[in-house]
Amino acid sequence: MIQVKINSIVIIPVYNDRDSVIQLVDRIKGELTIPILVVNDGSTDGLIDTDLQGIDYCDHHHNMGKGA
């Protein structure tokens, strides 16, 4: 039998929901040990990478829409 190791990551797309995503990330960090990536799709509500200490963060400078 072949054994396969599966790697997982949590990807959280965000658009103008700063407070909710900070709370969500804190809850996920407490439950899971897999990497978390927050993708900010051009939010204008002040979300920045320093709001999410220890989390991988990707920032689109303008809204790119679904699937971006």
Image: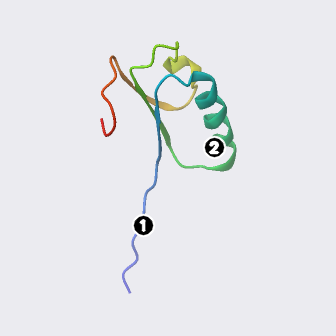
How far is disc 1 from disc 2 in space, using C-alphas? 22 Å
Q: Is residue 61 above or below residue 13?
A: above
Q: Residues within 10 Å of mark 1 (few under 14, many from 20)?
A: few
> Which residue position holds label 1?
5
Residue 19 location, x and y as percent? 63, 23
Left or right of 28? Residue 63 is: left
Q: Is residue 21 above or below residue 7?
A: above
Left or right of 56? Residue 31 is: right
Quarter of the image for residue 30 reads top right
Which quarter of the rendering shows the C terminus? top left
Colour setting: rainbow
* In front: label 1 or label 2: 2
Q: The disc labelled 2 sits on which kind of residue?
A: Ile
| Residue under the point 52% across and 14% down | 45
Residue 37 location, x and y as percent? 46, 37
Q: Secondary structure at mark 1?
A: loop
Q: Between residues 5 and 40, which one lies in front from this camera angle? A: 40
Q: The disc labelled 1 sits on which kind of residue?
A: Lys
| Residue under the point 63% across and 36% down | 24
Q: Between residues 50 and 44, which one lies in front from this camera angle? A: 44
> Which residue position holds label 2?
28
Mark 1 and mark 2 lie on one chain; the one further toward the N terminus is 1
| Residue under the point 55% across and 25% down | 17
Residue 48 location, x and y as percent? 50, 17
Q: Residues within 10 Å of mark 2 (few under 14, many from 20)?
A: some
Q: Is residue 2 above or below residue 54?
A: below
Left or right of 47? Residue 66 is: left
